[in-house]
Image (spheres, rainbow, N blue to C red):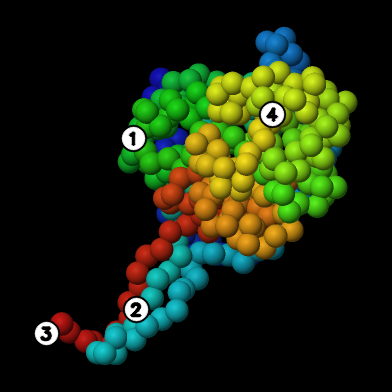
């Protein structure tokens, strides 16, 4: 069987499973998710053994440190997956919920019902935890899903796929409700993004090159973001100790996450008080600084920043720093160079906070928080299937509601249209 034939078969199976999932109740979904959580805990050693194979292969291929970090299934990441499964299981089932009903003059009742999208294809790299997060969210929202992880995580994803199948079997749900593509051949990706008869939406999670390719070639609609060029702006009304802790956490929590701060913007009135000590703290942690000329005067170790630095998502221990004249200049910088992902202001001035949240056009805009909170689990979504910088259909961390749509439901008593 060719890759194209195999993917068509997977697509047909997913479509059939999506129809069956419309009959699944919340008790079944919760049972499946709890069974997965228990299996993750019980099979931790076997799962990490499979992950070790991927890590050794990754080191042999000289994958970067951030990619290896994303690839690693540590005890902490497995515990987070278990907690995410249980949080998703406990959340209200969005499927079948109704909006407020209106009654038309003829007595006809009109409402909207939340329903699954259908079949969701997930294409992702490096992070095997996405396999669990995506399966859980798609399952809870009543969708069937096809998961195609990167070749660097193949053994980890196949091991997680077996755990998912155990959960589906325990709850009596269709086995093809979640399918993990078992080939690293890139032709599988090319097939998925054109399978308009079998897949309703593709959600890519990976590097900019992957997502750019999919955006150019896909015939199936995408929910995507290209990169996370995130900013923290320290206002002249900021509490400087709070600002220092927020900025440090935003950059160093984990370099490889899409919510990592890539540019620090500092108001000119507090730059001399804030930047020298802040810069020393970053440098002591191994972060390379690249600053504008005014910032460089306060940061002796910093290289002079270029336009490429303002535009780059480093995903590593490099930070761009710019001194700005005002909050309007900070917003203008974010508008020019940001990716619409996540941006934050540190300030004690309520009008400045309101202006920033109103005028910064990103999928998430924070006040007095580090950008690394850009995560569905932290938002109370249980987990996320991705962070969307689209305007349609979903924006920001995509959780259960973002994996559903609405249909109109009307009820009458024999009314006819005159």
Tell me the residue at 75%/21% (across/down): 302
For the point 34% across and 83% down, which residue is it? Answer: 109
Tell me which residue sits at (69%, 29%) in the image. Answer: 294
Of tags 4 and 1, the one toward the viewer is: 4
Q: Is residue 347 visible?
A: yes
Q: Is residue 404 above or below residue 103?
A: above
Looking at the figure, which quarter contains the N terminus? top left
Q: Which residue is mark 2?
A: 110
Helix, strand or loop for disc 3:
loop
Label 2 CA crowd tier, 10 Å (few <14, some 14–19, many 20+): some
Residue topped by disc 1: 219
Q: Secondary structure at mark 1?
A: loop
Q: Earlier in the sequence, mark 3 or mark 4?
A: 4
Drawn side of residue 375 relative to residue 47, left or right? left
Circle 4 SS class:
helix
Q: How far apart are the two marked residues, 4 and 2, measured between alpha carbons?
A: 60 Å
Q: Who is closer to the viewer here, 198 or 256?
A: 256
Q: Where is residue 70 drawn, in percent x and y?
A: 71, 30
Disc 2 on helix, strand or loop? Answer: strand
Q: Is residue 319 visible?
A: no
Q: Quadrant of residue 409?
A: bottom left
Q: In the image, residue 274 lies at what x, y percent?
A: 80, 39
In the displayed structure, would residue 80 be above or below residue 58? Answer: below
């Amino acid at each position: 069987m060719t890759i194209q034939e195999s993917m068509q078969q997977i697509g047909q199976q997913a479509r059939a499973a999506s129809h069956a999932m419309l009959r699944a109740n919340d008790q079944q979904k919760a049972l499946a998710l709890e069974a997965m959580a228990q299996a993750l805990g019980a099979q931790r050693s076997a799962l990490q053994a499979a992950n070790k194979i991927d890590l050794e292969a990754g080191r042999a291929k000289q994958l970067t440190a951030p990619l290896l970090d994303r690839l690693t299934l540590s005890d902490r990441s497995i515990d987070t997956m278990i907690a995410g499964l249980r949080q998703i299981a406990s959340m209200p089932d969005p499927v079948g919920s109704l909006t407020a009903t209106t009654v038309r003059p003829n007595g006809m009742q009109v409402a909207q019902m939340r329903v699954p999208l259908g079949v969701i294809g997930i294409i992702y790299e490096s992070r095997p935890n996405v396999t669990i997060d995506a399966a859980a969210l798609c399952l809870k929202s009543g969708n069937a899903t096809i998961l195609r992880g990167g070749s660097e995580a193949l053994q980890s994803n196949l091991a997680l796929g077996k755990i998912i199948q155990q959960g589906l079997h325990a709850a009596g749900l269709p086995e093809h409700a979640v399918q993990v593509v078992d080939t690293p051949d890139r032709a599988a990706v090319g097939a998925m993004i054109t399978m308009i008869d079998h897949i309703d939406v593709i959600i890519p999670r990976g590097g900019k090159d992957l997502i750019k390719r999919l955006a150019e070639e896909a015939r199936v609609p995408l929910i995507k973001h290209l990169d996370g060029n995130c900013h923290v702006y320290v206002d002249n009304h900021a509490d400087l100790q709070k600002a220092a802790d927020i900025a440090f956490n935003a950059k160093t929590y984990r370099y490889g996450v899409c919510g990592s701060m890539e540019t620090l913007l500092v108001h000119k009135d507090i730059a001399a008080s804030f930047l020298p000590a802040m810069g020393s703290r970053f440098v002591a942690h191994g972060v390379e600084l690249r600053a504008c000329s005014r910032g460089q005067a306060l940061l002796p170790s910093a290289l002079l920043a270029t336009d490429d630095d303002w535009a780059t998502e480093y995903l590593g221990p490099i930070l761009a720093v710019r001194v700005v004249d005002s909050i309007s200049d900070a917003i203008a910088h974010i508008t020019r160079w940001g990716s619409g992902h996540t941006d934050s202001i540190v300030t004690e001035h309520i009008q400045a906070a309101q202006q920033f949240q109103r005028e910064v056009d990103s999928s998430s805009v924070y006040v007095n928080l580090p950008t690394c909170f850009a995560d569905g689990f932290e938002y109370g979504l249980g987990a996320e299937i991705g962070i969307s910088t689209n305007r349609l259909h979903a924006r920001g961390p995509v959780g259960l509601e973002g994996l559903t749509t609405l249909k109109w439901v009307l009820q009458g008593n024999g009314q006819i249209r005159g």
